[in-house]
Amino acid sequence: MESEITLHIVLIKPTPNVVFGLQKGSGSNYETIQKQISTSNDLSFTFTVKVKGERSKDTFPKLSGSFVQGPTDNKFVYIDIGTAAGQPDTLWSRRLKIPLTGITWQDIDSLLGNSMLEAIVAGTDKDGGPNCATVKPFEGWHLKHT
């Protein structure tokens, strides 16, 4: 059985004056959507993913869709940053990898009505630039009611 769930990413205090956007598609066939220039505010990205699998034989749901990247056992989404997000006038060219691992069948079951799973991630790295590479530490996905 296939269904869809809504995911929401919040970037806390990202590096100012840099464009951040959600990557849709993969390889050389992708576009950056929901582009936002950071100020002093947090940024957020909302999107849907497909959920597949059988509870009786799959320990975790199988996630797919136009925002989902990576191999079966290590799915993630990308936030494109700076020139990677189409901003020509910046020193930054990075991508932030947000893991989809850890989303359980119980998480899927908890999504009723106007709710989604949310990940809260630091937007600035230790060097003062935009956070990039795989998010560490990653606090995981949590239920959010809208």
Image (cartoon, rainbow, N blue to C red):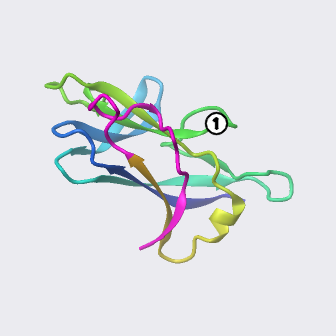
Seen in the image, is 40 located left or right of residue 3? left
Residue 99 against residue 116 in the figure, above or below: above
Q: In terms of secondary structure, what is the magenta stretch mainly?
A: loop
Quarter of the image with the C terminus is: bottom left
Residue 131 against residue 46 in the figure, above or below: above
**What range is drawn magenta here?**
122-146
Q: Position of residue 24 (x, y in %)?
A: 42, 40
Seen in the image, is 83 located left or right of residue 142? left
Crowd class of label 1 (few under 14; some 14 to 19; many from 20; radius 10 Å)? few
Q: From this viewpoint, which residue is outermost toward the bottom?
A: 113
Residue position for label 1 = 74
* Residue 98 on the magenta segment: no
Q: Residue at x 43, y 28 (%)?
A: 29
Q: Position of residue 58 (x, y in %)?
A: 80, 51
Query: Dot 1: what SS?
Result: loop
Seen in the image, is 112 located left or right of residue 54? left
Seen in the image, is 14 located left or right of residue 56? left
Give whichever of 29, 40 is nearer the camera.
40
Quarter of the image with the N terminus is: bottom right
Give whichever of 59, 25 is nearer the camera.
59
Q: Label 1 amino acid? A: Asn
**Residue 4: quadrant of the picture:** bottom right
Q: From this viewpoint, which residue is outermost toward the right?
A: 56
Q: Position of residue 118 (x, y in %)?
A: 47, 59
Q: Residue at x 67, y 58 (%)?
A: 2
Q: Residue at x 49, y 42 (%)?
A: 66
Q: Residue at x 32, y 50 (%)?
A: 12
Residue 130 against residue 146 in the figure, above or below: above
* Residue 123 on the magenta segment: yes
